[in-house]
Amino acid sequence: MIASNQNTEFARGLEGVVAAETRIGFVDGINGRLVYRGYNIEELAESSTFEEVTYLLLYGKLPNKSDLANFKNKLNADNHFDDKLFRVLQDCTKGSHPMSALRTGVSYLGGLDKNSNKSDLASQESMGLKLMGKFPSLVAAINRAYSGHEMIKSNEPDYTVRFLEESFGKKPSEFEVKVFRTALILHADHGMNASTFASMVAISTLSDMYSAVTAAISSLKGPLHGGANEQALELLERIGSAKNADKIVGEMLEKKEKIMGFGHRVYKVYDPRAKILKGYAKDLAKHTGKSELFETAEEVEKVMISKLGTKGIFPNVDFYSGIVYKSLGFDPKLFTPIFALSRISGWFARSLEYLHDNRLFRPRSMYKGEVGPIKYVPLEDRK
């Protein structure tokens, strides 16, 4: 057998291949930094709001008061949807993962938008803002449908507060808002990951922003990407308590089983997002009086770092985000839709950025099959 394209360099999974330029976000895996438009994630998480960060990702600067007010007005101009979509979401969540409902919900909204056949930049930006404005209500509605409750509509203009109000039917505390808002900021963008790449591939065809986000959601659904925090929490709950961590983790490592929530394709040091979320997970443990899950996580972290830290294996963002969401009252099946609630800002920003100098993605594969020609044998003569 002969490989064609013999002069083509092959990188499985496109690892290390540079396929686009960006000014939006930078993941420094060696030094453990995450940068949005030049700002360290730690400062943004501490001082900013999710709308401010989204504006920064989209337009390259932090907004002033007037900019922010106008931006929030655009997001809230048409931020709800009719009951028909909620019935669709109810049907989707009866036997499937909530991410399937989210994927369907975005496609449904795209089908209703008469401008979704337009590919110019202004139309793409308009579609992105319209979809993002609906996202808190969409994910909250999926939460309500999955838990067997009716949809709630809130007129709250804040992205974070509206989502929490429509999810739980009550006004969240300032502490809950701060924790959840921080989680949204930390997950907003993270390089050219699988879901972001999927959104950019879709938009490079001059499809619409709904299609780009649907492609991203489909990629995020997988357990090797957005579903990892759900699996990390399942592991912690299976371990049960801190005293079991050394034994169970040791046995898993001996069997070469993957410990979800540890290691990263880019970070070879402690994920800066995990550091921040660990602090909030600890605060939530005190706030709720339920510390066993966090204590188990801390012990698992100690065991893993002692065994694999020299190989650059440390907690990633998924390890502590699941604890945070669980402590706030979310079902683990909602963790990945919540991830999407944040990451839509990165998908939107990077898709729009790519369109400014668009080129259709068209990688090549290395053919390893027979080059022939093989003589065709009629069906009746084949053995």
Image (spheres, rainbow, N blue to C red):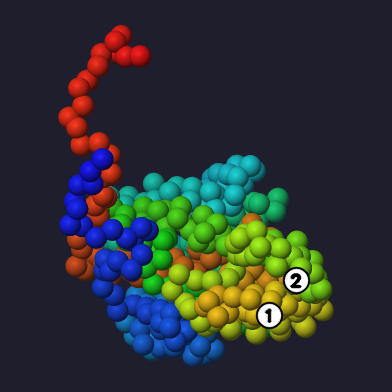
Residue 375 appears in the figure: yes
Could you tell me which residue is drawn at 75 percent across and 71 percent down?
245
Image spot of residue 287 (x, y percent): 77, 82
Image position, residue 220 (x, y; %): 48, 58
Left or right placement of residue 25 versus residue 289 in this view? left
The amino acid type, in three-letter code, at marker 1 is: Lys
Does dot 2 land on a helix, a strand or a loop? Answer: helix
Contact, mark 1 vs mark 2 (Cβ under 8 Å) = yes
Figure check: 50 above or below 93? below
Q: Which of 368 and 110 is in front in this view?
A: 368
Report the disc number at residue 302.
1
- The residue tagged 2 is 245
* Quadrant of residue 37 within the rendered picture: bottom left
CA gap, disc 1 and disc 2: 9 Å
Please give the name of the residue rendered at 55% of the width and 57% of the height, measured from the top-left corner.
223
Figure quadrant of residue 278: bottom right
Query: Type of residue at label 2?
Result: Ala
Which picture quadrant has residue 249?
bottom right
